[in-house]
Image: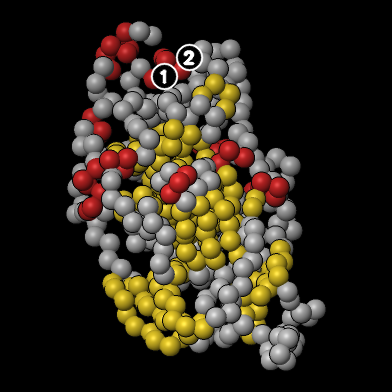
Amino acid sequence: MAYYRRMGDIPGKRHTMFRKPDGTLYREQVMGTKGFSGIQSILYHHHPPTAVGKAELHAAFDIEFEEQGALRHRHLLTGDCTDTGDAVAGRRYMLGNEDLLIAVANVDRPMDYFYRNGDGDELLFVHEGEGAVETMFGTLRYRPGDYIVIPIGTIYRVIPEPERGRTKLLAVETNSWITTPKRYRNSHGQLLEHSPFCERDFRGPEKLETYAELGEFEVRTKSRGYIHLHMFNHHPFDVVGWDGYLYPWIFNIADFEPITGRIHMPPPIHQTFEGNNFVICSFVPRLYDYHPEGIPAPYFHSNVDSDEVLYYVRGNFMSRKGVKEGSITLHPSGIPHGPHPGKIEDSIGKKETTELAVMIDTFRPLRVVKQALAYEDSQYMYSWCADSQEASRTV
């Protein structure tokens, strides 16, 4: 969500002398996208951001996907995943393609290192828990329902608050950007009146804390298929001020204002974010369609050019049986999908839904990660056959 922000101390003009109290210069860093023609921010450091005492290859970033099998709908019960860890090393990858990776994480400890993604933006959806994301731009506090958008190259670490319960995350790692849908913005970037959210709903860093000490600080960088280790000679959060349009920000799913109509509206009305070859949507509590003969449940449909992923957060999802909190369903392009038997009939006459879910549509096929198979409901593809004859007799 690009709009101008400023925190801390900065000089009156960019690219001019900005001195510390002792007369030495702060170090200016321009951090921008698209080769200086995209959005950018300018940060002012106590120390050069290039002051690295050691650089080495830490580990290969290998994601092993399953072999190609029959085209089918998939259901991953990620709520059964009990693995724990920090917000990065603790990620368990479920799906991915050339544009993004989708993971879940049960976060039970703070990161004892710093991290940055050098490949693209990241989005962390907070299913449960509270805590802080500390970044070079300042600290953001998170709570359940928050979408945390972390721009490419941002150094950060996640510090959960165990006394607030565990932190459970859905993580989307991209090879591009994440922003709001273009159709909701005018030519100046301002959100339009018909947008389901506005600038008031977005939260940037709340507090800029500056650490000037020297020492050894581990920064892990994801880039080019590897995790690289850089040992900084100074604390990476040594920024005294910054301004610009590039910084981490938060939008809470509860602030998404659903768009409704007399008859069933298509999924794009739920769109919240977009990136290269994917969109992210929010299904939130809302009133159902109000045409006197309307059918609230979605119609059967074919994703002829996109794969559809749903992450179920809470509530009784009106079109599905057998899904639980933390379930991930994948409905691939090439075959139709839609409500389970009886769900169309059950929806008639209903006035509202309390469902909460995150949807990710990708315009290149997704593959299932091998480790995700441990959580798969292997019978999901055949769940539309059960009770179908009985359901048809009740119409």
Q: Quadrant of residue 9?
A: bottom right
Q: Quadrant of the N terminus?
A: bottom right
Extreme residue in the front direction: 163
Image point (26%, 27%), residue name = 383
Horizontal and vertical percent for residue 268? Answer: 54, 40
Task: Classify 10 Å Cα crowding around label 2: few (below 14), some (14-19), many (20 and above).
Answer: some
What residue did someone put label 1 on? 344
123 or 100: nearer the eye? 123
Q: What secondary structure is marked by label 2?
A: loop
Q: Say whether residue 315 is left or right of residue 369.
A: right
8 lies above or below 330: below
Image point (45%, 46%), residue name = 163
Q: How many marks?
A: 2
As shown in the figure, which amino acid type bears the numbered disc 1? Ile
Whether the residues at callouts 1 and 2 have beta carbons within 8 Å, the answer is yes
37 or 105: nearer the eye? 105
Horizontal and vertical percent for residue 218? Answer: 41, 76
Q: Quadrant of residue 100?
A: bottom left
Image point (54%, 21%), residue name = 352
Task: Classify 10 Å Cα crowding around label 1: few (below 14), some (14-19), many (20 and above).
Answer: many
As shown in the figure, which amino acid type bears the numbered disc 2? Ile
What residue did someone put label 2 on? 348
Image point (42%, 60%), residue name = 110
Q: Can residue 304 be seen?
A: no
327 lies above or below 184: above
221 lies above or below 280: below
Horizontal and vertical percent for residue 60? Answer: 28, 72
Q: Say whether residue 358 is left or right of residue 341.
A: right
Q: What whole-number distance in Å separates the C-alpha atoms at marks 1 and 2?
A: 7 Å
326 or 376: nearer the eye? 326
